[in-house]
Image: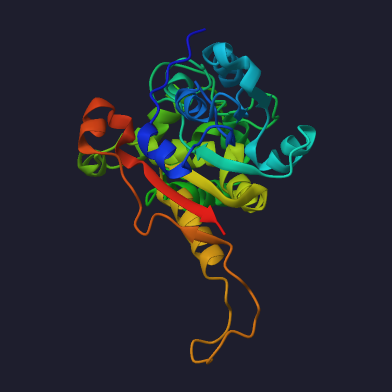
Amino acid sequence: MKYRHIPVMVDEVVGFLNCQPGQICVDCTVGGAGHAKAIIREILPNGLLIGIDQDNDAIQAAARALAQYKGNVHLFHDNFFNLPDILKRLSLNAVDGIFADLGLSLYQLESSGRGFTFQGDEPLDMRMNTDCPNTAEEIVNSASPASLKQIFKTYGEERWAGAIVKKIVDHRKNNRIRTNRQLVDLIRSALPQRVIARRKIHPATKVFMALRIAVNKELEKLEQFLSAAVEALKPGGRLCILSFHSLEDRIVKHRLKEWENPCTCPPDFPRCVCGKQPLVRVLTRKVRRPSQDEVTRNPMARSTCLRAAEKL
């Protein structure tokens, strides 16, 4: 199995994490270890890298990619919201740096065979962790029309959710939707040609993103992870997150803002009486984006949003 992935904004990630020799850093979405290799080179010789990924294929790929550093690496097939339990298993109270890349890998799109892509004819799975029970096929064929519409509108921001759901519901009355190709065809048939022609993205992009988020409970787990991450950092420790769509970036942005300014006192109060103290210093006043050169080399990087903070 070849695990292909092009890591995004590697230099920026390492810079914002401020990696130093001897540090303990966590790559919460280790994937093909592109970011992990850059991080571990900075924290050697005595540093420790903890790699987490819910995709077991990614863990196997990371083990191969990081084999030369095995004395400085611990890998876990788990979800990043379980970070406190993972650190407890290693008898660690806190770490120096935490990184998460919330995007899909090229491997998941091209080679996983789980229906993340619009191409080919693959089972409609979309699970990042294949040990989990619920699949995109189950949701598409079993969820109520109202639930499907809410998923597509909330997670995919799909304006044509109603028309797409109607096509899906009409089709599934007699034929189960089992593959990504079937779903793509239904989405195309639901959208007016003028809408398809006007869109700069594949017509199925928003629905596929929404289903992936729903299957993997990505936004709920991101919220849990953020709470765990700030608690797991040492004072002066850094958190760096790459997100790839507005819903994720909004959650990260708002949480960093809340941590930096938690005071709930009315603006006209002469001094704070709520007693809530800042937890972090935000390092990215404006979201950081990849350079045009990087986007040219890797078009998948174009939607990347980087945000970072330092624990006080």
- The quadrant where residue 78 appears: top right
- Residue 94 visible from this viewpoint: yes
Q: Is residue 230 above or below residue 185?
A: below
Q: Residue at x 57, y 67 (%)?
A: 278
Q: Is residue 130 above or below residue 244?
A: above
Residue in the foreground of this view, choosing between 233 and 228: 233
Horizontal side, residue 249 vs residue 279: left or right:
left
Q: Which colour assignment does the render follow?
A: rainbow
Number of labels in the image equals 0
Residue 304 coordinates in the image, percent (x, y): 36, 41
Horizontal side, residue 160 vs residue 254: left or right:
left
Q: Residue at x 38, y 20 (%)?
A: 119
- Residue 169 visible from this viewpoint: no
Q: Residue at x 46, y 42 (%)?
A: 18
Residue 142 coordinates in the image, percent (x, y): 63, 37
Quarter of the rendering occupied by the C terminus: bottom right
Horizontal side, residue 118 vs residue 263: left or right:
left
Residue in the foreground of this view, choosing between 67 and 137: 67
Residue 22 coordinates in the image, percent (x, y): 58, 32
